[in-house]
Image (spheres, rainbow, N blue to C red):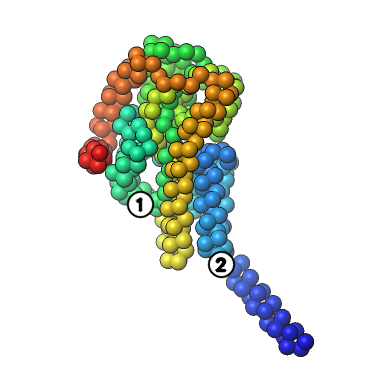
Amino acid sequence: MKINKTLTSVVMAAGMTMGLAQAAKAEVWDMPLAYSGSNFHSVTAAEFGQCVTTGTGGEIEIVTHPSGSLIKGADIKRAVQTGQVPIGERLLSGHQNENAIFGFDSVPFLATSFDDADRLWKAAKPSIEQTLADQNLTLLYAVPWPPQGLYFKREINSVADMEGIKFRSYNNTTTRLAELTGMLPVVIEAAEISQAFATGVVESMVSSGATGYDRKIWESLTHFYEVDAWLPRNYIIVNSDSWNSTSDANKNVIRGCAELAEYAGTWRSKEYTGFTLAGLRAGGMTVEPAGAKLKGELQDIGATMTSDWLSAAGAEGQAIVDRYKAMQ
Ligand code: PCA
């Protein structure tokens, strides 16, 4: 009995000490996300956060904040760069205005399938990693969105049919696409599109089935044309000062969780492609490949946009395309 009591108090004391030690070491990493909590990228990020929290024994606890609720999508990169938050997720091509290289994954018809997008990512990753490192950012993982198609609220058979339509854009490429097709671009974050469509601020966009599905777009729009124009990526970055002050053991855990997240997120993106297109149909939308005339005209516009991007991205952009083509 006495021994038991002593043992119990030793165990309790040890437990308390360990608890205190853990509490002293526990670090909360707030992780802003630009997209809604139900979106597959956000689900993947939440699992990544859980993996890190568990794997580091609670020394680093990652708390995700979806829908731009902590920091708006457009401001996430800057917030991580300046150390306002240690980690965050954002659409990579949202930063083309800073450096054209970030738009490598939004060049029309360069990579139109998951396999091609994967090769293109491998070709571009060293440049992107270096560009980010120069900005005090450490890249952890990146996951593609499903292929991009065009949403409208009526049947569209040619570029001429698009004249004057108010178009929601999400990066430089999509703004340029609107200009070249005679539409009127307005930049709107995905988290805010339901309202923008409901109030008629915009009436068309280029995006994945996933984003239309997440935002119940059938409440405002009627047609989705599969164009498979490109597969842009979301990427997860850590502030390099936070990264450098992380122990090697925890860095290993984070790298492992990131690898799992990239794999799981990519798998989900593939699965989600068919699922969400079926969801748009179930919502009453017409979902079909763009007609031959429209597709041909978009290819011509895509060629213009490709040469625009190559001149903006210079030798580094050309090197990415060359490496990518050499992999095919
Ligand atoms: N959804 C995001 C980016 C690409 C996509 O499929 C959006 O529409 O903002």
Q: Position of residue 189 (x, y in %)?
A: 51, 32
Q: Is residue 254 visible?
A: yes
Residue 105: numbered disc:
none
Residue drawn at point x = 52 percent, y = 16 percent = 153
Three-letter residue code for mark 2 = Lys
- In the displayed structure, 41 sits above or below 55; it is above
- In the displayed structure, 180 sits above or below 98; it is above
Label 2: how many residues lie within 10 Å, few (<14), some (14-19) or many (20+)? few
* Lateral position of residue 1 relative to residue 85, left or right: right
Q: Position of residue 259 (x, y in %)?
A: 42, 53
Residue 133: numbered disc:
1
In which image quadrant can residue 107 be found?
top left
Give 21 or 81, whichever is nearer the viewer. Answer: 21
Q: Is residue 90 visible?
A: no
Q: Position of residue 209 (x, y in %)?
A: 49, 29
Q: Position of residue 261 (x, y in %)?
A: 47, 50
Q: CA distance from mark 2 to mark 1?
A: 27 Å
Q: Say if mark 2 contacts mark 1, CB within 8 Å.
A: no
- Disc 2 marks which residue? 25
